[in-house]
Image (cartoon, grey):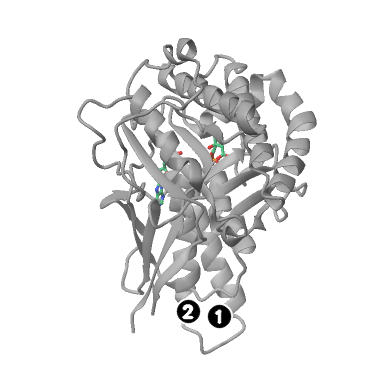
């Protein structure tokens, strides 16, 4: 008998950012957060787990290279928690169930996009790990329950247990049992939401999220203001915007929260800079794009957001994707075209030649061209983890 399961899980990009922990071991955040799950047809982690009594210990290979599993590290904690659930929820209830909780596991995972390059590989990676072990162990658990485990791998990973629009409720309990992900709306509620990831740099990050956010907790007064007076209000606003499919309101709060997250990074001692000149120039481009849109229709058409790195994620509705791609091509040209491994999934006429939008202020636009965008990934809102195979 072979005990093996494979699952894939998506990336998510937050609109209301998680930044700061009140418990670093259990990974309990200082504020709630909310994200959009991106389609795993484009970006995903795929993980296979196998349990076998003949294995000598738990081992994990990431993109073909072995990663050490050190107790009580994050990987070891997730695996131990899932084994415990297998024992309590399956084996203790059914004496005939194989004692998989006592077998060592071998886990192999692949990301189909660059790892640790600011594209949220830890989120899809830990969500895929938890989903594959949960399938292997046949755990009768909801995605929210599994999100409690993924959270202990990487905070943002808990949101990748759902598709669509997802909130991570910070919770108040010391044991973390109420700090979990919940679905705000499924993908099908607002499938027109698309995302363009502008890859400005695929280098490893300067300051990791994990260390950066704790430095912010220790040194930033602005973070305390954000936690108490800003995020609770924004969580309500963005949930209402999503429920009403109000893109203008969604864009306003998403951009404001990205700005404030980078402001608290700057308010850290010593300060942390995640954006570079190209990132800032993309902000200026979207601001000008929205200015023209507001003049014409009274509403914004795009929202930028940046995580702990220089890459921009631009949320927009499907109908605007082509126009924005053309703008990026025009103002951030890549001499040899866009390179692998970043593909453009535009599917609606490719990247084009680069075009301006009618009404653009050319004096403002002159300032955009400060460098190249290395790659563009076009994707949309997607579904939650998929079990591909379990035996
Ligand atoms: P990113 O911006 O890509 O999330 P991080 O530095 O925050 O970068 O996280 C990268 C780390 O996440 C990796 O070093 C690894 O420990 C973990 N990780 C990434 N992908 C996977 C995966 N598929 N399975 C298990 N862990 C993963
Ligand atoms: C800026 O989830 O990577 O992307 O919990 O320490 O693993 P750890 O941090 P991580 O931080 C993500 C920070 C962010 C914002 C977000 O995704 O909400």
Q: Position of residue 156 (x, y in %)?
A: 55, 45
Going from N to C along the chain, the mark reached first, 1 or 2, is: 1
Distance from the alpha carbon under mark 1 to that under mark 2: 6 Å
On the image, the x and y values in percent for residue 248 come to 65, 37
Q: Can residue 141 be seen here?
A: yes
Quick check: is the Cβ at mark 1 less than 8 Å away from ligand 1? no
Classify mark 2: helix, strand or loop.
loop
Classify 10 Å Cα crowding around label 1: few (below 14), some (14-19), many (20 and above).
some
Q: Nearer the viewer, residue 224 or 214?
A: 224
Judging depth in this view, the residue of 287 and 21 nearest the camera is 287
Quadrant of the displayed image that contains ligand 2: top right
> Would residue 274 appear left or right of 352 to someone viewing this image?
right
Residue 7 horizontal/vertical position (percent): 42, 65
Residue farthest to the top?
Answer: 363
Where is residue 84 drawn, in percent x and y?
56, 67
| Total residue callouts | 2
Give me the residue at 55% from left, 35% from top: 302
Say whether residue 203 is left or right of residue 194. left
Instruction: Decide if residue 170 is in sight here.
Output: no
Q: Residue at x 56, y 34 (%)?
A: 303
Q: In the picture shown, does residue 132 fall above or below 316?
A: below
Drawn side of residue 320 relative to residue 183, left or right: left
Which corner quadrant of the image does residue 238 belong to? top right
Question: Residue 91 — which label?
Answer: 1
For label 1, the SS is helix
Q: Are marks 1 and 2 in contact (CB under 8 Å)?
A: yes
Residue tagged by mark 2?
99
Q: Compared to 217, does 114 lie above or below?
A: below
């Amino acid at each position: 008998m072979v005990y093996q399961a494979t699952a894939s899980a998506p990336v998510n990009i937050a609109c209301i950012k998680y930044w700061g922990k009140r418990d670093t071991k259990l990974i309990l955040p200082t504020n709630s957060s909310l994200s959009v799950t991106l389609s795993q047809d484009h970006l995903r982690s795929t993980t296979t787990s196998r349990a076998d009594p003949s294995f000598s210990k738990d081992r994990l290979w990431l993109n073909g290279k072995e990663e050490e599993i050190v107790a009580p590290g994050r990987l070891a904690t997730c695996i131990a928690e899932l084994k415990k659930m297998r024992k309590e929820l399956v084996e203790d209830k059914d004496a005939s169930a194989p004692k998989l909780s006592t077998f060592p596991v071998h886990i192999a995972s692949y990301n189909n996009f660059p790892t640790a390059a600011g594209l949220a590989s830890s989120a899809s990676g830990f969500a895929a790990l938890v989903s594959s072990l949960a399938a292997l162990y046949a755990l009768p658990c909801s995605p929210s329950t599994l999100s409690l485990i993924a959270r202990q791998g990487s905070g943002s990973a808990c949101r990748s247990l759902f598709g669509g629009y997802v909130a991570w409720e910070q919770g108040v309990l010391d044991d973390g049992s109420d700090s979990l992900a919940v679905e705000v709306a499924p993908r099908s509620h607002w499938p027109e939401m698309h995302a363009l990831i502008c890859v400005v740099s695929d280098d490893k990050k300067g300051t990791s999220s994990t260390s950066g956010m704790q430095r912010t907790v220790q040194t930033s007064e602005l973070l305390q203001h954000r936690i108490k007076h800003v995020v609770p209000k924004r969580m309500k606003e963005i949930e209402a915007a999503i429920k009403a499919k109000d893109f203008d309101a969604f864009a306003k709060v998403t951009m404001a929260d990205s700005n404030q997250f980078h402001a608290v990074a700057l308010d850290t001692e010593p300060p942390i800079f995640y954006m570079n000149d190209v990132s800032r120039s993309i902000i200026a481009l979207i601001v000008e794009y929205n200015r023209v849109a507001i003049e014409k229709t009274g509403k914004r058409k795009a929202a930028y957001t940046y995580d702990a790195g220089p890459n921009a994620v631009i949320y927009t509705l499907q109908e605007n994707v082509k126009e924005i791609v053309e703008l990026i091509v025009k103002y951030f040209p890549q001499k040899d075209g866009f390179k692998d491994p970043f593909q453009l999934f535009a599917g609606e006429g490719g990247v084009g030649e680069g075009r301006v939008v009618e009404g653009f202020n050319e004096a403002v636009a002159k300032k955009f061209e400060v460098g190249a965008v290395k790659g563009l990934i076009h994707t949309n809102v997607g579904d939650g983890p998929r079990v591909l195979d379990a035996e």
